[in-house]
């Protein structure tokens, strides 16, 4: 398996730090509003990367944080007259709903910055003790020039940054030893949330948050660090400086970054009115369509979002889902069970589609070519499966289709959706069973509904239900 490493600017063979295991950290969103489709791209891309590692038999420890203390969160809280905590909790919950609808798996751990402050304070103190950081009037800064390898990820030269690119400098230069030094800890302002530290009551800088959370949940060295390409500088560059200075070890072996998402060939921005949240897209499309659309391009290629391209993605996805449904229908009505010798020969050919899929994914997670392999399998299934096929042959085709699309996070074996009236009838039957003390039947109905994506909640007012 070969990965394109941003650090070296080339594809490298993946060799894990520990055989059979992958330690992976992906920078998550700052939670002050609904996530937008730009946020969705790294979520979908790196969820697919994780799924492929798992498909290959790796045990993946996948950590993705929520930044739940930030200027934007504080601003939103002030606007609404509520606490920052209320804002962050609300939008973490909404983000998790959108992630579930996009079939993004929950991380092994979703750390919250506000719950890891003690570790951040310890890491900052370690950096001060080692001479990499200093305090001025309650603010702690990182001495960028003290870290000799600064710029190795973004391939930026410190002197060039100092002289030519003033826009890249971090603000607050008047107190710094060097304008390129960045903040590790800042004192609180009136009305802001704060935590105690040896330097001031305040809060951590953004960069130190990920360094500490990655270290706590994955260790001092990790296999893969990933995120959007906008994070390469300064966020990931600063993470490397902090982590390697504090721990005295190389931080991440491989750095993966997805390219930007444009809207109708223009950068997404609220001022242009082409800013879309995932929730808004869900009002027009099943979010499986958004996921499929995102994976139709290589993750390192800029991706253009438009209504026409989404319509095309929807039609393409329908072809795959329809093929799966056709196989399911034929299986139910199959006249014979076991494969014939002719079918066994035909089935052997499916290995070619699996190989093509794996070859594409092994080449820096080329999901566009992997999808092409899935379409070849769909075409083969459509032309070789019919009413005379055996159940074993049909199931074999369906199993492969489900297995490959599951790597992409695309659900093709959709369970038949119950109508509201059917759900209410089953809930009533469950209530009657409970009154009759037939708890086995009541539990069976609950489980049946759960399998079909219906979640029951017993309350004082009666039984409430919702679709997962």
Image (cartoon, rainbow, N blue to C red):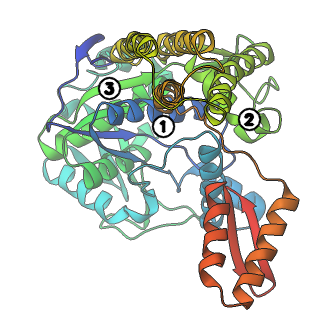
Q: Quadrant of residue 198?
A: bottom left
Left or right: 360 as drawn, with respect to 125 = right
Q: Quadrant of residue 438?
A: bottom right
Q: Position of residue 218 (x, y in %)?
A: 26, 49
On the image, numbered disc 1 is attached to which residue? 171
Q: Residue at x 65, y 40 (%)?
A: 414
Q: Secondary structure at mark 1?
A: loop
Left or right: 445 as drawn, with respect to 124 = right
Q: Secondary structure at mark 3?
A: strand
Q: Earlier in the sequence, mark 1 or mark 2?
A: 1
Quadrant location of the C terminus in the rendered image:
bottom right
Left or right: 187 as drawn, with respect to 282 = left
Q: Position of residue 148 (x, y in %)?
A: 17, 27
Name the mark nearer the viewer: 1 or 3.
3
Q: Position of residue 420 (x, y in %)?
A: 85, 58
Q: Which class describes the residues within 10 Å of circle 3: few (<14), some (14-19), or many (20+)?
A: many
Q: Report the disc number at residue 282.
A: none
12 and 353: which is toward the camera: 353
On the image, numbered disc 3 is attached to which residue? 255
Q: Residue at x 23, y 15 (%)?
A: 12
Q: Residue at x 51, y 18 (%)?
A: 259
Quadrant location of the N terminus in the rendered image:
top left
Q: Position of residue 70 (x, y in %)?
A: 54, 52
On the image, numbered disc 2 is attached to which residue? 286
Q: Is residue 211 above or below residue 285?
A: below
39 and 339: which is toward the camera: 339
Q: Earlier in the sequence, mark 1 or mark 3?
A: 1
Name the mark nearer the viewer: 2 or 3.
2
């Amino acid at each position: 398996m070969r990965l394109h490493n941003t650090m070296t600017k080339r594809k490298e063979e993946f060799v894990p730090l520990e055989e059979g295991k992958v330690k992976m950290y992906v920078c998550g969103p700052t939670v002050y509003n609904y996530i937008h489709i730009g946020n969705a791209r790294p979520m979908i891309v790196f969820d697919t990367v994780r799924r492929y590692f798992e498909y290959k038999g790796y045990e993946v420890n996948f950590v993705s944080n929520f930044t739940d203390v930030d200027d934007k969160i504080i601003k939103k809280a002030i606007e609404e007259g509520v606490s920052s905590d209320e804002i962050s909790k609300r939008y973490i919950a909404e983000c998790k709903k959108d992630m579930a609808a996009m079939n993004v798996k929950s991380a092994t751990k979703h750390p919250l910055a506000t719950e890891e402050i003690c570790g951040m304070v310890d890491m900052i103190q370690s950096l001060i003790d080692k001479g990499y950081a200093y305090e001025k009037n309650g603010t702690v800064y990182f001495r960028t020039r003290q870290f000799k390898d600064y710029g190795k990820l973004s391939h930026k030269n410190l002197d060039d940054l100092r002289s030519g690119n003033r826009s890249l400098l971090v603000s607050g230069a008047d107190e710094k030893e060097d304008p390129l030094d960045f903040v590790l800890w800042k004192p609180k302002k009136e009305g802001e949330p704060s935590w105690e530290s040896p330097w001031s009551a305040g809060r951590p800088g953004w960069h130190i948050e990920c360094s500490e959370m990655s270290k706590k949940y994955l260790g001092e060295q990790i296999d893969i660090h990933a995120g959007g390409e906008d994070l390469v500088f300064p966020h990931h560059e600063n993470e490397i400086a902090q982590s390697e200075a504090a721990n005295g070890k190389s931080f991440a072996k491989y750095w993966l970054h997805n390219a930007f998402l444009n809207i109708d060939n223009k950068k997404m921005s609220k001022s242009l009115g082409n800013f879309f949240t995932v929730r808004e897209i869900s009002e027009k499309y099943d979010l499986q369509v958004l996921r499929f659309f995102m994976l139709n391009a290589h993750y390192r290629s800029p991706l253009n979002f438009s209504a026409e391209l989404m319509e095309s993605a929807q039609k393409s996805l329908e072809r795959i889902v329809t093929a799966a449904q056709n196989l399911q229908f034929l299986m139910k009505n199959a006249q014979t069970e076991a494969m014939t010798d002719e079918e066994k020969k035909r089935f052997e050919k499916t290995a070619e589609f699996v190989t093509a899929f794996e070859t594409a994914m092994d080449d820096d997670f080329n999901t566009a070519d992997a999808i092409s392999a899935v379409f070849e399998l769909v075409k083969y299934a459509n032309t070789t499966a019919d009413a005379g096929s055996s159940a074993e042959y049909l199931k074999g085709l369906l199993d492969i289709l489900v297995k490959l699309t599951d790597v992409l996070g695309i659900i093709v074996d959709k369970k038949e959706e119950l109508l509201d009236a059917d759900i209410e009838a089953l809930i009533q039957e469950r209530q009657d069973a409970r009154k009759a003390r037939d708890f086995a039947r009541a539990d069976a109905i609950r489980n049946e509904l759960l399998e079909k994506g219906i979640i029951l909640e017993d309350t004082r007012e009666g039984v409430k239900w919702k679709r997962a």
